[in-house]
Image (cartoon, rainbow, N blue to C red):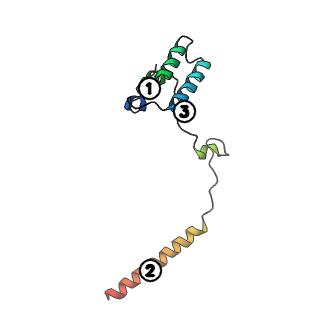
Amino acid sequence: MAELSRSSKYRATPDLPLPDGDRERLVERLNAAYASGNISEDAYPGLLDAVFSATTLGDVAPVVGALPGEVTYQVPAVIDTGNQRPGELAQARAASPMLGIAIAAGVVLAVIVLLTLVWFLF
């Protein structure tokens, strides 16, 4: 049985009511763990009973601790859509024409501001 972290909602807020959606997800995870052999035949009925009889998040903490870890992230888009092999460098993208326009506009604005300052100071 894995120890739940203190930030887990099951340990951090054990007195909150157990939402039906959480109960359903726990039953699905429990069934999948049993089917894959991660939960023994002896432990399964007790854990299932604990989920269905639970009224608070704290009541299901032992069940969550008995379940295998769950992936809580998604694959980053840059990895998911890349088309080169690992370690290969991607081709550089062409500079945006808007970048050149923005730089030129910034230079013109800076010159105008400087000329205006020189005009009023002298």
Task: In this rendered view, identify the residue nearer to me: 45 or 3.
Answer: 45
Query: Which residue occupies 40% across, 32% down?
Result: 16
| Alpha-carbon span between mark 2 and mark 1 | 70 Å
Give the left or right position of residue 79, taking residue 53 as reference: right
Residue named by callout 3: 71
Query: Which residue occupies 63% across, 62% down?
Result: 94
Q: Amino acid at mark 1?
A: Thr
Give the left or right position of residue 56, taking residue 49 as reference: left
Q: Earlier in the sequence, mark 2 or mark 3?
A: 3
Q: Comparing marks 2 and 1, which lies closer to the viewer?
A: 1
Residue named by callout 1: 55
Secondary structure found at label 3? loop
| Alpha-carbon span between mark 3 and mark 1 | 25 Å
Q: Amino acid at mark 2?
A: Val
Quadrant in the rendering for residue 59 = top left
The x, y position of residue 13, in whole percent, is 38, 32
Residue named by callout 2: 111
Q: Earlier in the sequence, mark 3 or mark 1?
A: 1
